Image (tube, coloured by chain):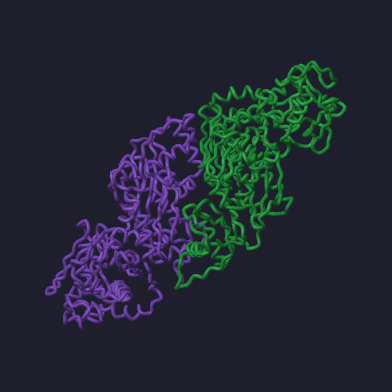
Chain colours: A purple, B green
Amino acid sequence: MSGETKYLPLVVGESFELERPSLKDNSADWDRLIKHLNRRGFDPISSQGIPLDRIKSISSTVRKRGFSGRAILAYVIDAWDIIEIGDSKSSILGAAFDLGTTRIAFYLVDLLGAKILYETSISNPQIPFGEDILTRINYATTPEKLRQLQLLLIDAFNSLMVRVAEELQFDTNSIYAMAVAGNTTMSHFFLGLDPSHICREPYIPVVNNFPILRAKDLGLKMNPEGIVYVFPNVGSYFGGDAVAGILASGMHRQENVSVFVDVGTNAEVVLGNRDWMIACAGAAGPALEGGVVERGMMAMPGAIDRIRIDPETLELTYHTIGDQKPLGICGSGLIDLIAEMFQAGILTIQGKINTRIEHPRIVATPDGMGFVVAFSHETADGRDLIISDIDIGILLKSKAAMYTILNIIARKVGLDIHDIDRFYVAGTFGNHIDPQMAIRIGMLPDIPIEKFVPLGNTSGQGASMLLLNRNMFQEIREICAKLTYVELNVNVELIHEFRGALFLPHTDPSLFPSVKIPQIAKG
Amino acid sequence: MSGETKYLPLVVGESFELERPSLKDNSADWDRLIKHLNRRGFDPISSQGIPLDRIKSISSTVRKRGFSGRAILAYVIDAWDIIEIGDSKSSILGAAFDLGTTRIAFYLVDLLGAKILYETSISNPQIPFGEDILTRINYATTPEKLRQLQLLLIDAFNSLMVRVAEELQFDTNSIYAMAVAGNTTMSHFFLGLDPSHICREPYIPVVNNFPILRAKDLGLKMNPEGIVYVFPNVGSYFGGDAVAGILASGMHRQENVSVFVDVGTNAEVVLGNRDWMIACAGAAGPALEGGVVERGMMAMPGAIDRIRIDPETLELTYHTIGDQKPLGICGSGLIDLIAEMFQAGILTIQGKINTRIEHPRIVATPDGMGFVVAFSHETADGRDLIISDIDIGILLKSKAAMYTILNIIARKVGLDIHDIDRFYVAGTFGNHIDPQMAIRIGMLPDIPIEKFVPLGNTSGQGASMLLLNRNMFQEIREICAKLTYVELNVNVELIHEFRGALFLPHTDPSLFPSVKIPQIAKG
């Protein structure tokens, strides 16, 4: 394959100088270009997929330019598409999006230089219509409302692209490809597909494998003929974000069995290797994303993300992102807090605040007992930052769900989760949490710390990878074909497993040999 | 392949009853349908080619109908397209068009019953913008004028379809496929492609292989998602009409070498068999279509199509189409007239009216000598129907061109045109002319009459064949790949050959042993 780079980007530029029409070679203008590009390795060219209007304008441009120029070609799964005929100097950019329920992350990718030029993220503008997906699905009951939610996403994507284009001084028309990795519902919203059957039994999406679209059909402010690829879902609860995540982890290429965990609004768990893969997902995440715990917040400036408690003095130290006055507490801060409270004997193994301890941080609140993480004079809003029994209960449900999913999925294939080779932890969560703390509360299995590999935003990485390597289409196809999705919502095992996992670290402490259970916590 | 018929029509109906979604099979709605159709033999389904809007509406229809219904599927070259989900009883119709410079022929085809339900033809509505193609190309110099000429064709197609739908009482939405066979310029006009380079050296079309289009993109009054296939050109002077003609003749499947001749506005000649094919075309036709000869007209009611002259008495008898009073004379009538005038000694071998003969039919006209075919009291318009020396000269040029093309093309492959196995004569021309008369004037080679096979409108037949047999796509591809087009406009042999062929029957009478040359004609 020819092209201007040694990489295999999704979109390439190919400068050409066609033999001029003559009586000896009187091919049609369009056919002349196609024949030349075929010979240069762009074969087949998706003639059936290129609309007549584009064939017209490309043919006429080729002629006006004296049969030379530079073709911008996009790979559209098994065939090439000619996007436009342009200038040989112009850059070829791509936009990768991780379309989360709560946040949208954007990566501007230079396909010629094979690097990420810019990354940023914003809140999902649909949040006013529901923090969680279910509320948004219930809102979007008419085509107009569905369209409204779709447009919020399109507008958000557009404003990100336009803003970065202004900042980096490029033309949005040089964005020729977009890759979007979202969960099943967000992908449906983005494409304006009715998500109403995703959330009720038997949980059916409209489409799993989305066709490649044109930017102009969605109203995206990039090259109007540019391609838009939305990662396929495997099921209602296993979306393109997780598929992109697996792609980024590389677990599907390895011989050894590993686990991939992505905790976002949902927790997705995948177990497998290059030969097989089993996945499930469950609502493990909300507590960790700041949506449910009263003083919970996203991992952003002002969030307490690290907490230590001296077991002797019960002295508490914390760290906030951006070293600002604390505004709230994010997922990793909550895990730290509970792990340290438990270690210090402030929490019982049932996860209740030990009322036998008298300490200025242990206070009564309208929601039951509470623990003051930061006093009013330390906080940004001048209010005590208190975590209540109820908040802790919510977090315990999340951690129990995570552990249960991990165990059920391992048992499905006759493996012990403790025997796994590698444990990839994706997401902001993976980057911020201290695995030791997660083990201490029984959220992650009690395996050697070095087996944990934090990966960051794997959905965004997977989407960017595809822009830089078109062979990823094949890997995506293989991942989807290989992956067996286990629907947890109907698994009765879950309830029993889950109850045991609600304890700190677990009703069966032999599962967590490295965790020292303080006498006082036993109550 | 499944389907409702034993034929292989381009569009088929497939009734289905999908397994209902369940926790055991929670495929997405769209993927469920695709999987089922794949299993039924419709594989691959062109998921990349089906627009998102259609995926949406089909998925929602499938759900509303309780996961059963009837899919209308169109074959779009190597893949299947789902056009709609409809009722199991509705008919599946197709529209075949022979898009000629002068006339448009329409065939309504029943794809379930595998038969032609209706056929009709109308004048090409572009004629007011030029009888010949060149004038129309010169008119269409702006996008607006090009669009105007395109819309004339679209409107004409629409009015034909709507009229027939009213007459036969069906819904135009049941027309799911259209096949259009036109010459290169007409196909360009139909698709709104700039034809301006077709008519000047080095004679370059914009596109030879047109993509399959959607009816709604062209504004055609059939099913809006229905497919529109335009037969590919091989070159500027060898269009989709001739490709469809070869398809209908079947010469590309035979072991023996045969000739295919289609005389429309151009004369296309093809020589070959299943292994090779050589073609050329030239402006042999206008005189025969009534566009140039003063009293010439199309083969339609009122046209003189048969003429006999008694060589002794010079008594003239004629036949008109529809047995009406004569309005003019069509191509076959002109050939008869010249052949009979020659035989009776009224024409010299140079094709001039023999002024040594005195007869009431031989008269002086402002255009030189003339011959009265019908006197004023016999004709529909009350004027003498006279053919002048100039008219005869025009016809002789046509016949000389035809003979020259035939000979040059045969010589290219080292064959004598007289050795050819079969001689397919397409078009109205083929149906009306008397081969013996055409041989007598030296238009067709002097071969046994039984070798001539008149075929009728082969372009329309080829287009209809494709609607009824999707395997024809492959044959069309093979014809185009096999066919070598010889550009005659630049062949210097032509001039020399042509001069000899201007005589009656030829300067070399040994080429026409069966033609008795009257002493008187030798002058």
User: Vertical placement of A159 versus A425: above or below?
Assistant: above
Q: Nearer the viewer, residue A190 or B422?
A: B422
Q: Position of residue B239 (x, y in %)?
A: 58, 38
Seen in the image, is B399 located left or right of residue B489? right
Residue B91: give x, y in percent of width and height.
66, 58
The picture places residue B247, in percent across and down from the top left corner, at 60, 45
The C terminus of chain A: image quadrant = bottom left
Residue B461 appears left or right of B478:
right
Is A473 left or right of B121, judged from the image as shown? Answer: left
Q: Residue at x 35, y 79 (%)?
A: A493
Q: Quadrant of residue A274?
A: bottom left
Residue at 20 percent of width and 63 percent of height = A377
Q: Is residue B477 above or below residue B66?
A: above
Can you tell which quarter of the image residue B313 is in? top right
**B271 vs A486: above or below:** above
- Residue B219 in view of the camera: no
